[in-house]
Amino acid sequence: MRIGELSRRTGVSVPTIKYYVREGLLPAGQLTSPNQASYEETHVRRLRLIRALLDVGGLTVAGVRAVVAAVDDEERPLHNIMGEAAERLAPRYDSTREKDAAGDEPAEEPPPSLVAARAKVAELIARRGWHTEPEAPQSEALAFALAALEDAGHGGFAELVDDYADAAERVAHADLDWVAHNVVREELVESVVIGTVMGDAVFSAIRRMAHVDASDRLFGTER
Amino acid sequence: MRIGELSRRTGVSVPTIKYYVREGLLPAGQLTSPNQASYEETHVRRLRLIRALLDVGGLTVAGVRAVVAAVDDEERPLHNIMGEAAERLAPRYDSTREKDAAGDEPAEEPPPSLVAARAKVAELIARRGWHTEPEAPQSEALAFALAALEDAGHGGFAELVDDYADAAERVAHADLDWVAHNVVREELVESVVIGTVMGDAVFSAIRRMAHVDASDRLFGTER
């Protein structure tokens, strides 16, 4: 199909499609003449993946580029793809504070709150018997969140990690079971990547819905 | 304390502190002379909240401004604060596609995938008997995530919403129980706001840790 039809099929404008090609998110079409390229169904699908990651997953263009590179990497071993996706798609925080818009320089030593949070994460992993490394990006992401809560004066929130871990195990088993039973091999990597990223958005929304419900039941009579 | 001490106590540079004051995130200090202001412990705490929301919560400066305004709103009724936080802190998607960097114009009609996703969300709410509105921002956020998954060719993921809802109920009850038993009234709003935002970051990290564990148990022997 021509670029105009690709645009109509996906609701993405022609300039935006060209922008995604320039940015390396979308493969270029097959040139059929010096000024015209032809696009396939794979482009339709990829464009919808890009929009999902940008619009709902909240990824940056650079983040989407990394994700589609992972999807396209045919060398990737399939046996541990969910674990790899977890590591590659974990938010990464510098072990020192990153420069911000106003020009902060990073500190040199990890603050005590981060040291303590890393110990809590290692304890959680040991307590659950999880096959996961305390130094992996997802474990570091948890340590950063707990350290930030401590620094903000809400360190007590860390008492909830086992409740969160129970819930996360439930979701992770459902995710993996779904991948194992419902996904054909050719779509495995894409399914895992999009499930990892979009599952966050799904859970965040459902958690807020459950908050409203639980809050209404607990406090609703006071109205 | 002077601004230099506030900076040392929080690890946030003086120019950044001034930037947060200009942007309305942090109240100005009390002027003690025309060129000097004095800061309190409340400024230390607020600065750490701002950094947590920016660095780990992933909020924008505008998002942080909305959150601190909610924290500072003393008129806010306390009886349903978690529900309000859920609504105010839900990601908001336009019901039509927003303009993106490349200049897309929004479409006029909601696409069929969004209409179908809204129906699925209403069914979920009915099935769970949740006291929450299908039109509320958090319900819309879920509908957008499901529609994006459908558009990207992964609509089957929606089969997992009840597993996610089970897990979300578990987390929501833990969140509310913690707030009800561990938080003094003066800190209630701040605790709920930070718990809502930071709980997403905590769950996202723990879910990835659980993915690695579950994937290793399921597929690890193939290595």
Image: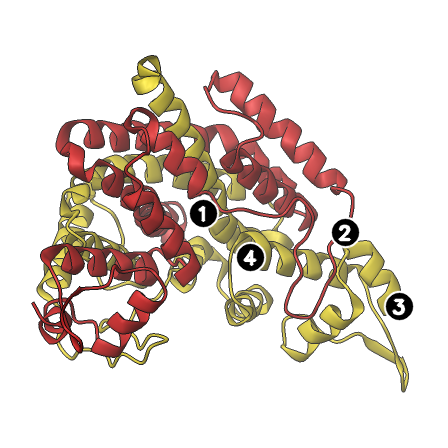
Chain colours: A red, B yellow
- Residue A189 - label: none
Viewport quadrant of the N terminus of chain A: bottom left
Q: Nearer the viewer, mark 2 or mark 3?
A: 2
Q: How many marks?
A: 4
Q: Amino acid at mark 2?
A: Ala
- The CA span between labels 4 and 3 is 28 Å
Q: Nearer the viewer, mark 4 or mark 2?
A: 2
Residue position for label 3: B2
- Give SS at disc 1: helix
- Residue B189 - label: 4
Q: Between residues B64 and B99, which one lies in front from this camera angle?
A: B99
- Give SS at disc 3: loop
- The CA span between labels 1 and 3 is 35 Å
Q: Residue furthest bottom?
A: B34
Q: Earlier in the sequence, mark 1 or mark 3?
A: 3
Neighbor class of circle 3 (other Cα within 10 Å; few <14, some 14-19, many 20+) is some
Vertical placement of residue B200 versus B40, above or below: above
Locate residue B49, reporting x and y percent. 64, 57
| Chain under disc 2 | A
Q: Between residues A175 and B173, which one lies in front from this camera angle?
A: A175
Neighbor class of circle 1 (other Cα within 10 Å; few <14, some 14-19, many 20+) is many
Q: Earlier in the sequence, mark 4 or mark 3?
A: 3
Residue at 18% across, 44% down = B158
- Residue A107 - label: 2
Picture quarter containing residue A190?
A: top left
Residue at 52% across, 49% down = B198
Q: Amino acid at mark 4?
A: Val
Q: Is residue B50 visible?
A: yes
| Chain under disc 4 | B
